[in-house]
Image (spheres, helix red, strand yellow):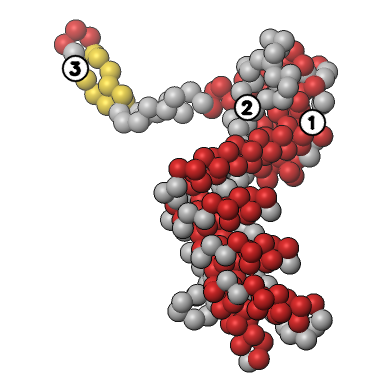
Amino acid sequence: MEELETEEQFLQYARNGDLPGIQRLLEAKTRREAQINIDCKGKSKSNLGWTPLHLACYFGHKDVVEELLKAGANVNLPNNIGDTPLHKAAFTGRKEVVMLLLRYDACATVINGTAQIPKDVTQNAEIRSMLEAAERTEERKLEEKLLESAREGDLSTLSQLLNRKKPPDINCTDLLGNTPLHCAAYRGQRLCALKLLKSGADPNAKNKNGQTVFDLASDSAMKQCLEGVVHRGLTRHVKKYEGPLWKVKSRNYVLWPKEKAIH
């Protein structure tokens, strides 16, 4: 009961921007004089599901936000409807808080319960530009991670990236213009190459030297593997027509439905 009351007080301090109160409770937590979950979620009607960081961000208390982040608050923890602290700061137009959150690696592409990312909830053009820049940075980091996992044969990471709700561009390129599939091909990472092909990688993409994955294949076995999958893939991706096909019979133009399907 005492712990619950302490956390409610912690939430109240964050809401009101009471930096000394926040510092006092954090110090008590450090000395183990108080049990406080820094990411505790409110139970009352006014803060239901919100963490102290959500509250401080929403109300624009930059100094409290910074204190919480320094103390290890989870910058990307969503509330009960999927909003992160960045959503809240963006929504209320807290430019300095948004900048601070981004410095602490807040994710600009988290989707909330209404399918909105932080830039979608702001009316502030400057904040929107900042978040769009952060999005591009995040996207490039994911692309570089995809390229690296293809080169190193890290199938687990590669699969995880491709299975994201918003995966990186599967045909992204490195400085030489090589796609992840190029990287897997010249490093002999067959399993990664297969996964990329099955996920829609373009086998005909050319790097800056005009080379395709077939040109860079590490050996004949890799080349045969790529060619085999691409050949099978072409037969699977023939356009499928729905509905009956009709055939003309002799010159009387008698028509009848034929079996559906080019699969």
Horizontal and vertical percent for residue 208?
A: 70, 13
C-alpha span from label 2 to label 1:
14 Å
How far apart are the alpha carbons under marks 3 and 1? 59 Å
Viewer-nearest of discs 3 and 1: 1
Residue 171: mark in rendering: 2
Q: Within 10 angstroms of label 2, few (less than 14), some, or many (20 or more) residues?
A: many
Q: Are marks 3 and 1 in contact (CB under 8 Å)?
A: no
Nearest to viewer (mark 3 / mark 2): 2
| Nearest to the observer: residue 243 or residue 250 | 243
User: Which corner quadrant holds the N terminus?
Assistant: bottom right
Q: Which amino acid is tagged 1?
A: Arg
Q: Residue at x 49, y 81 (%)?
A: 44
Q: How far separated are the C-alphas under marks 3 and 2?
A: 49 Å
User: SS at mark 1?
Assistant: helix
- Residue 132: quadrant of the picture: top right
Image: 145 above or below 43:
above
The reply to whether discs 3 and 2 touch (Cβ–Cβ < 8 Å) is no
Q: Name the residue under label 1.
A: 151
From the viewer's perspective, is residue 5 above or below residue 16?
below
- Horizontal and vertical percent for residue 94? 52, 55
Evaluate whether residue 74 shows in this view.
Answer: no
* Image-based side of 150 in relation to 42, left or right: right
Give the residue at mark 3: 254
Pick whichever of labels 2 and 1 is earlier in the sequence.
Answer: 1
